[in-house]
Image (cartoon, coloured by chain):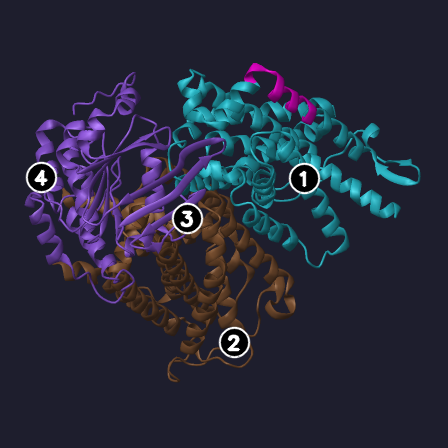
Chain colours: A cyan, B purple, C brown
Amino acid sequence: MTAFLSVLLDGFASGMLLFVLSVGLSVTLGLMNVVNLAHGAFGMVGGYVCVVLLNRMGVPFPLALAGATVAAGVLGLVLERTLYVRLYRRDHLEQVLFSIGLVFVLGAAVDWFMGARQQLIQLPDWLSGRVEFWGVGLGRYRIFLIAVCGALVAALHLGLVRTRFGAQLRAAVDDGVVARGMGLPVPRLFALTFTLGSALAGLGGALGVEVLGLDPTFPLKYMVYFLIVVAVGGTNTVIGPFVAALLLGIVDVLGKYYVPEVGAFIIYTAMVVLLLARPHGLLKRADA
Amino acid sequence: MIALGTCHLTRRFGGFTAVDAVSFNLLPGARHALIGPNGAGKTTFVNLLSGALPASEGQVMLFGQDITHLPQHARVRAGLARTFQVNQLFPQFTPLESVTLAIGEREGQGATWWRGARHGAEAARLLDDLHFPEADRTRPTAELPYGRQRLLEIALALALKPRVLLLDEPAAGVPPAESREVMQAIAALPRDVAVLLIEHDMDLVFRFAERITVLAFGAVLADGEPDAIAKDPRVREAYLGTAEVAHG
Amino acid sequence: MRIALHALPWLVAIGAYFAMPEQLPLLSAIAIAALFALSLDLLVGYAGFVTLGHAAFFGLGAYVAGILGQQGWGEPISGLLIAAAVAALLGLVTAPLVLRAGELAGLMVTLGLGLMLYEAANKAAFLTGGADGLQGVEIWPVFGAFRFDLWGRTAYLYSLAVLFVLFLLAQLLVRSPFGLSLRAIRENPKRAAAIGIPVKRRLAAAYVIAAAYAGVAGALLAQTTQFASLDALSFQRSAEGLLMLVLGGLGTLYGALIGAAAFTIAHHTLSEASPQFWQFWLGIALVALALLGRGGLMGALRRMTRR
């Protein structure tokens, strides 16, 4: 029983992480109707920036996280303004080719400089080891993850519901044409949102080195996970993707722990089934 | 016998009722116009008839057959064709290819894979009948002047040899210099085809229609002969305060 | 003149057999890639239906032909036909799922199905050999006479012959009313439905045909290399197929051939330098093609000849 609770909590933590990694994609897809298969690349870049800062330059862990966030955000901003902006009106095939290409380029670059091996980081002492609650052993890092990601969820939710930017964003996701007609600065909204989404992915990638692993195949390996979160969770709220990410994280970790012989098959099947069960869910509007 | 009939046909979008319990009959060989102020639900109504949109409630009958749940292509097979208010053509196809394709589908040969298309001659005859200029028949549709594209809209519908034809604002946006051939085509429609014309241009409506139905706020406001409709105070009221001017 | 132009790629292919006897395995790889690109072209280029999981059919064909050969039925032609049939069957079963979901969701369903099949093959090691690949495939001589030799002569001529026959069939298909209706659906699905084209049924038919073609391509790979591995099912392969297509020119059958040849040769040359080098330039090519628009090499050729 306690083992089960431990695994469950692991799943919870990785679900939180998946949310931070993929929330940006749900906005890209919903707001801009862009099939961006390269979203994970921002997570990968964040991860590597964190590894380099921490391992090679001895920067403290919280600062390394901040560095990863900023680096991925800046990369997102630059790519959005120079390249993505040309793709908004193109068809899905071109978006698919472009974003796969971007994944290949960034993956090859990372492979060239850092090698193909899994990256490891040395966590600071205050985040290592386990603590016991009522006989259930919990990794400190998992608790840290849950706290950080939980705070982010709350901040994003309040940001979307309470701020002017959030209201504009929701209006633009609901109906881009109307939003433009109302005089909302849609291009600036796009750029800001893309930057924010990339920065969050970068932070997720950095936080995830210890949990999800990090190597040049990271963007492709987790692409399906991000897509599931978006497909199931919807694009207009924070809570939808959050719940979807939690479920996905828990199912994934439980599956890998208890039925390893089935492997990732469960996740892929879940994706297909959910897409078919909710064909008129959130993705329908992105189609229209 | 009723060519095309609806019974309490309704379509809702969320809380908004675009077409509200419309019961309507189109007789065989009719020249019938459907008019109404902007936003009256005319195009939604056409989309319900053609099957482009599913109905929320009610029935659509084609020559006594319930087609409410038939998909679009099956309604076409049953003899119901339409044109679009905004051109819906095949931009890279030539008009000759487009019409040939439509004829082939009508003849049930669309799934033929082992030989080329066979209806080029019939397509050319149809384009002849519509006075479609020879030189424009083998250019990509996207390069044609707007008026000629509107004419192709009608040609594609006629290629299907429909029993019922829905014309959704066939002359909309055609510059006067190009409108003659479209008007000719409308005037020369085969007499045995029942035609429902959705139109804003009142000159065309009163020249063409033998019966008129007025739609307002998704419901039938009035239905009758053109003279009666022109005198109907409710119709005048519905049109006042909108940008439309009734010429009739 | 036109006939000469049509014969040209095939004359080049036969000429290559004599001119580059030491490069026959590369030439076979080109022929197989061309068949895969051709199958994608029917679906993506002509019918306008984008898929991210086409490797599923390629890999399935490879494993079917490979397992047949491993289990004692090494007759190549019937192996191809069985592989085509099994791939078509998978296409038939999955087509309603993929088409039901709508465009964007359908794209993701193709991706999900592809990954499912990859994972299934990975885990079903008793059947597929898992990550080690399928060992011990034995293929009998073609027509009982032409043995698969060490230099790859039979392999190349066999692959080329199959490609040629299926290319002719594809040409017949795209020029027929059926092919015209697929292009019509790509151009304007709304109008296609309004002239009585059963859009979903036609797309499903295109999907099944493309699946069968990809199955044959996979089977050719397994038979000529006497080996099948998870690579055949990978997402990478689906993506590469799309790249070949866009590189050569969408919606032109010769574009698929040229794109596959250019891609395979570039892959061969660049990955000799280093795998990262290849991946980097592949990515750059994808980004550039996506941003600079359609037409590919065929488009460039046409512009050159028009001048």
Chain bearing tag 4 is: B
| Mark 2 Cα-neighbour bin, 10 Å: few <14, some 14–19, many ≥20 | many
- Chain designation of label 2: C
- Image: magenta residue range: A153-165
Left or right: where C213 falls relative to C68: left
Tell me, yes or no, whether the highlighted magenta stretch contains residue A161: yes
Q: CA distance from mark 2 to mark 4?
A: 66 Å
Q: Which residue is mark 4?
A: B184
Give B84 or B200, whichever is nearer the viewer. Answer: B200
The image quarter containing residue B244 is top left
Do circles 2 and 4 both sit on a common chain? no
- Visible residue check, residue A156: yes
Q: Do marks 3 and 4 share a subunit?
A: no
Q: Which mark is residue C50?
A: 3
- Alpha carbons under labels 3 and 2: distance apart: 31 Å
Which numbered marker is on residue C186?
A: none
Q: Give the quarter of the figure containing the C terminus of chain B.
A: top left
The CA span between labels 3 and 4 is 42 Å
Q: Which mark is residue A119?
A: 1
Crowding near the residue tagged with mark 1, few <14, some 14–19, many ≥20 C-alpha atoms within 10 Å: some
Amino acid marked by disc 3 = Val
Q: Main secondary structure of the magenta part?
A: helix
User: CA–CA distance between discs 1 and 2?
Assistant: 42 Å
| Disc 1 to disc 3, C-alpha distance | 35 Å
Do callouts 1 and 2 mark residues in contact (Cβ within 8 Å)? Answer: no
Choose mark 1 or mark 2, whichever is in front.
Answer: 2
Name the residue located 15 percent from the left edge and 62 percent from the top edge: C3
**Residue B44 is inside the magenta segment:** no
Residue B235 percent coordinates (x, y): 27, 25
